Amino acid sequence: MPPNRLGFVQVSVVLRALVVMLTLVALVPAIAIAHGALKRSSPASGAHLSVAPRELRLTFTEAPELAFTRIRLLDPDSADVALGPLSIDSILTAVASVRGALAAGTYTVVWQVAGADGHPVRGRFRFTIAPGATGLMVAAAPVPAVVQTDGEVAGNVSAPGQSAAPAAHHDAASMPDGDGFGAESLPYVVLRWLQFMALLTVIGALAFRLVVLRLLDRREPPESAARSLLPTLSERTATFALGAAAVLGGIALLRLYAQSYAMHGESDALNGGLIASMVSTTVWGWGWILQVIGVALAITGFVVARRGSGTGWAIATAGAIALSYSPALSGHAASSPRLTGLVILTDGLHIIGAGGWLGSLLFVIGLGLPAALVLAERDRGAVVASLVNAFSPTAIIFAALAAATGIFAAWLHLESVAALWQTPYGRMLMRKLAVLSIVIGTGAYNYLRVRPALGDIAGARRIRRSATVELVMGAVVLALTAALVATPTSIDSP
């Protein structure tokens, strides 16, 4: 291979590593401010009141989903004070009227909120009503009970999240504590990690088959050894991707249970009515439905593609696009307080970029190189070089897409750099950056040591080892990301 070609291939490896590091650093503030937190309240935390409040107003840092929002008011004896139906005012503020009688003493407001990302955040604060305050021991007129279609009666003991009984998502009087299989638990982090891995594998399969192998097909002469591998690699790619899509289907079911557990508690995690309401009335639920549709399309497409049909790859591509946007609708992008549509669009493109880079690298290393290394000895090095040459320019494009969308997200969301070292989130980020430094080191090794040997068997084996390190470190980064997206930036309520 000409020296200038060798230099291009290895420089591209270094550039990819640098671009990925830039992207992940840029994305940190975007995720860091995504979790809802209580910004202010009326009554304020710690307030001493001379007038008994007739409503509770809680303003959050992100728009709360009404179906996921709960508020309780506890009197000095820890008994529930009756609240009216919960409503959302000015996008960020949850409001509940106080219908029960109030006496002097210290009251506790217990709240739960989740934005469109579906991650529940809980907290509490206290305020004190002074003796002799105006409005004590005056109860609001009773509100007639609402009769549901199944004959049950819906009361108004505490804010249920919806005013109409059929839309009531949960009884706030039994607010779950979020322990166990919740959004921030280790099992859920592992579940998200597996989801990320499987999603990037599905996208990577399409990038490998439709971009890398197609470019290889155009560059190589018909009689070349590299061209002879294309049918085998295409079939194996479809088979491997089919398994990844099936894993995503299983993960979707586990995600549904985990989300229901986090929102409703262990006792109601399998309550069909609550699950149906959660899926049908929330943005998180719509994102979950999109994932299920994407899985169905991807599985169908890969099954058809295994038979050599181009239609199968088209169907699988439609499924992959749906899967790419599912995290945006059930994650942080949908919670953005401004330019929400654009944020969702770029979030999906970011996932496509990351999958097209890391995912296709998985297939180059896991399928392409092994197939090349069992060819006749005289062809092995040349085929590996051809495969890497087809992969490198496409990887640069996908990595650039990931970088551009990541930088946009950072510009949109950046509010405080201090959160990087003052919060648990920031400390988790430092661990992530430490792993990324290994990726940079791997890119430098490829440029300085692997480049001269590319084109023969020894060079092929070296790049397989070094690229494997890159993939392993990428998997670790995804694991840290799975923990990072559920790590709150603040654990204290005002």
Image (cartoon, rainbow, N blue to C red):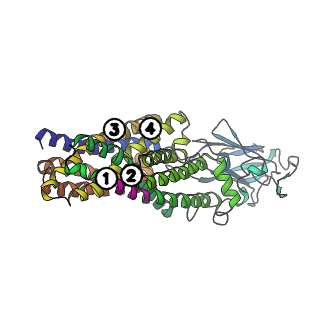
Q: Residue at x 43, y 40 (%)?
A: 349
Give me the C-alpha separation between circle 2 and circle 4: 39 Å
- Specify the amino acid type for callout 2: Gly
Q: Secondary structure at mark 3?
A: helix
Q: Which mark is residue 200?
A: none
Q: Main secondary structure of the magenta part?
A: helix
Mark earlier in primary sequence (3, 2): 2
CA separation in Å, label 2 and label 1? 8 Å
Tell me which numbered mark, 2 or 1, is placed earlier along the sequence.
1
Residue 336 at x, y percent in the picture = 54, 39
Looking at the image, which residue is at 46% across and 61% down?
190
Is 255 covered by the magenta stretch?
A: no
| Badge 2 or badge 4: first in the primary sequence | 2
Residue 308 badge? 2
Q: Amino acid at mark 4?
A: Ala
Crowd tier of the residue under label 3, counting other residues whose Cα lies within 10 Å: few below 14, some 14–19, many 20 or above? many
Three-letter amino acid code at the position of disc 3 = Ala
Rendered image: mark on residue 400: 3
User: What is the span of residues highlighted in magenta in the rendered image?
Assistant: 231-242
Amino acid identity at mark 1: Pro
Q: Are marks 2 and 1 in contact (CB under 8 Å)?
A: yes
